[in-house]
Amino acid sequence: MTSEYIISSLQKEKIIEYLASGKRLDGRGPLDYRDIKVEMNISKNAEASVRVKFGKTEVIAGVKIAVVAPYPDSPNAGTFMTTVELHPMASEHFEIGRPGIKSVELARVIDRGIRESGFIDFDKLCIKEGEKVWQVFLDIVAINDDGNMMDVAGLAGIIALGNAKMPLYNVEEDKLEGGLSKESLPINESVLSFNMTFHSIGGVIVCDVSEDEEAISEYRLSIAVGDNNGKPRITAMQKGKGGAINSNDMEKILKLVEDKYKSMFPKIRKYVFGK
């Protein structure tokens, strides 16, 4: 569960005033991202694990892979599940209990961006048609929330998947032997897609928002973007919050997607594939 995050009118006015002059309280411009830090292999028990930070916003993502029965409507395809845990240690506005709206939305948006892009080759996760397939679990845990959890969690997810190794499996004896093989999770590198989220605050479009900025934004638009021969390819889109997006703002955001993609995609690809 999550509780409502409220900031003072004075702080809200100050944020909007700074943005109107092309600045933010932390010294960044409206379209600047915070420093991104990636730390690999933080858990010995996962098929892949990563810690990702955008400034003070921090998440951990891990991949676990198990043998399960396939779904009846896709007997020759593996399965995929994404969960996001927003624990009180990450923010005083997160509560213990069943997943709240924010964690459910985060999991669904990240899952859809990965699934719809074709990043995982589910057909190659079939062990025996109609009987056994690999199921991929992507678990994301928030360590600290200082805004823009959508992009941070999304990046952690694709890095973890891009670095996951398959468990050792004895086909003849039909059992997991423990440990990991040298075989990577079947990934389609050519359709790599990452998430960029834009907010409107006082009529200004802002990237990589802080917690305070996120609390006062009029709307949020998250766009998952992949490569199309050097140009951005939109694979998923999700709007959040109550404000309406006018046509001028939509044009601005799509142009920003194109501009940001050019500088961001090479960095994201290196984080995910090391090249």
Image (cartoon, rainbow, N blue to C red):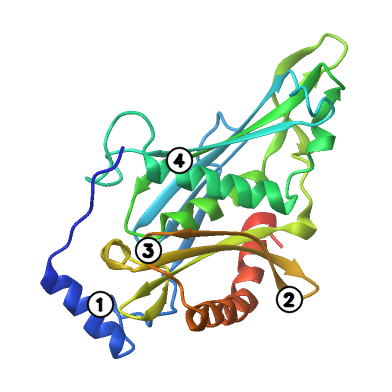
Mark 4 nearby-residue class (10 Å; few <14, some 14–19, many ≥20)? some
Mark 1 highlights which residue? 25
Mark 2 highlights which residue? 231
Mark 4 highlights which residue? 104
The label number, if any, that marks residue 55 in the structure image: 3
Query: In the picture, residue 35 is in which quadrant?
Result: bottom left
Query: In the picture, residue 131 is in which quadrant?
Result: top right
**C-alpha span from label 1 to label 3:** 14 Å
The structure residue drawn at horizontal position 44% and vertical position 79%, both measured from the top left corner, is 31
Q: Are marks 1 and 2 in contact (CB under 8 Å)?
A: no
**C-alpha span from label 1 to label 2:** 33 Å
Q: Earlier in the sequence, mark 1 or mark 3?
A: 1
Q: Are marks 4 and 3 in contact (CB under 8 Å)?
A: no
Direction from residue 76 to residue 99 in the image, left or right: left
Quadrant of the frame with the N terminus = top left
Q: Could you tell me residue 46's position as x and y percent?
A: 58, 32
Amino acid under label 4? Val
Q: Could you tell me residue 189's position as x and y percent?
A: 77, 55
**C-alpha span from label 4 to label 2:** 31 Å
